[in-house]
Amino acid sequence: MKLHQRTILLTGGTSGLGLEFARQLVALGNTVLVTGRDAAKLAQVQRELPQVHTFQSDVSDPAAIGQLYEQVTTQFPALSILLNNAGEMRKLNLQDPTRNLHDVTRELDTNLAGPIRMVQQFLPHLLAQPTAAVLNVTSGLALVPYPLAPVYGATKAGLRSYTKALRVQLQGTRVRVFELIAPGAKTPLNDAFVGDVREKDLMDPRPLIAQALRAMQRDKEEVYPGIATALRYLSRLAPGLLLRQLSKGVAESLARLRPPAPTTR
Ligand SMILES: NC(=O)c1ccc[n+]([C@@H]2O[C@H](COP(=O)([O-])OP(=O)(O)OC[C@H]3O[C@@H](n4cnc5c(N)ncnc54)[C@H](OP(=O)(O)O)[C@@H]3O)[C@@H](O)[C@H]2O)c1
């Protein structure tokens, strides 16, 4: 599909992979609408890329999605691509008794319910365009559980399942459905995982996003940059081995997270 002179809505475009998407999509000559929660980060993107349009919006909040829809479709009726990128990953100790029931599912609202609600809200608009697309950013951790970030992996596996179902439901329409199965990348998302993930295993966002955009231009529905290709095959051929590999060091890392034990005196 053509990725030039398009109007593209990109969630979480203020950092990491999203910011790189914004840079490359602007360079290709598109109108890019960037969302995020933090006003200071949105202002920073605006300074770096004066061509983008920013919207402060929290993808985990259904009311905010409704407001975003009104604003965006009024100001940019030619919107034809939705790029669901916003996400967060947390290291969670499931034995932590202080974790409350609301907090434990926080990533579900942003990483899974967020894209599902965005699609639901914007789909009628996309279906009315001459050609349109949705791209959902999942992860290599959709293919294998990552015991240090158990809820994150569940959200990405869920989003991958939803994306495949969405593609089937939209067959015969003018809306294409793409999935970026992203490998570990050098972005702030991994700041909390220093010592758990080897720096040299993290991919530079520039070639990663370039590969994702080339795949969209070639109508390739799924793209597995870098080490995600190895995860794709290993998760089928040796899923147990892969899980054991990703389980190494989990107990030690979680032990470092635990609040100090109460003193007995
Ligand atoms: N980096 C990796 O290793 C990796 C690997 C596989 C997949 N991914 C996926 O790639 C996507 C981007 O991750 P990243 O590595 O670029 O992370 P990042 O650098 O932490 O950026 C996350 C972006 O999402 C925004 N965001 C977070 N929660 C949001 C919310 N509720 N509503 C709206 N915006 C929100 C953040 O801005 P605000 O905080 O201002 O809202 C920021 O712009 C995520 O879906 C992630 O799961 C990343």
Image (cartoon, grey):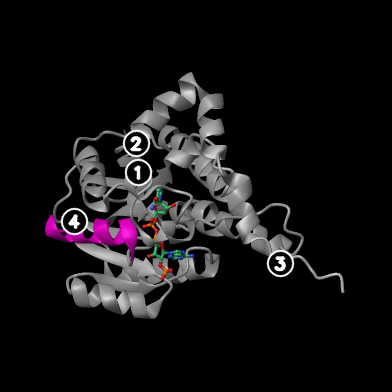
Residue designated by label 2 = 227
Contact, CB < 8 Å: mark 3 with mark 4? no
Q: Does residue 105 appear in the picture of this structure?
A: no
For marks 3 and 4, the one nearer the N-term is 4
For marks 4 and 2, the one nearer the N-term is 4
Under mark 1, the amino acid is Asp
Residue designated by label 1 = 201
Contact, CB < 8 Å: mark 1 with mark 2? yes
Q: Residue at x 32, y 75 (%)?
A: 42
Q: Give the range drawn in magenta.
A: 15-30
> Image check: 212 left or right of 260?
left
Q: How crowded is mark 3: few (under 14 residues within 10 Å), some or many (20 or more)?
A: few
Q: How far apart are marks 1 and 2 (CA)?
A: 8 Å
Q: How far apart are marks 3 and 4 (CA)?
A: 45 Å
Rendered image: mark on residue 260: 3
Rendered image: mark on residue 24: 4
Q: Residues within 10 Å of mark 2 (few under 14, many from 20)?
A: some
Q: Distance between the residues labelled 4 and 2?
A: 22 Å
Q: Quadrant of residue 61?
A: bottom right
Asked whether mark 3 lies closer than 8 Å to ligand 1, one says no
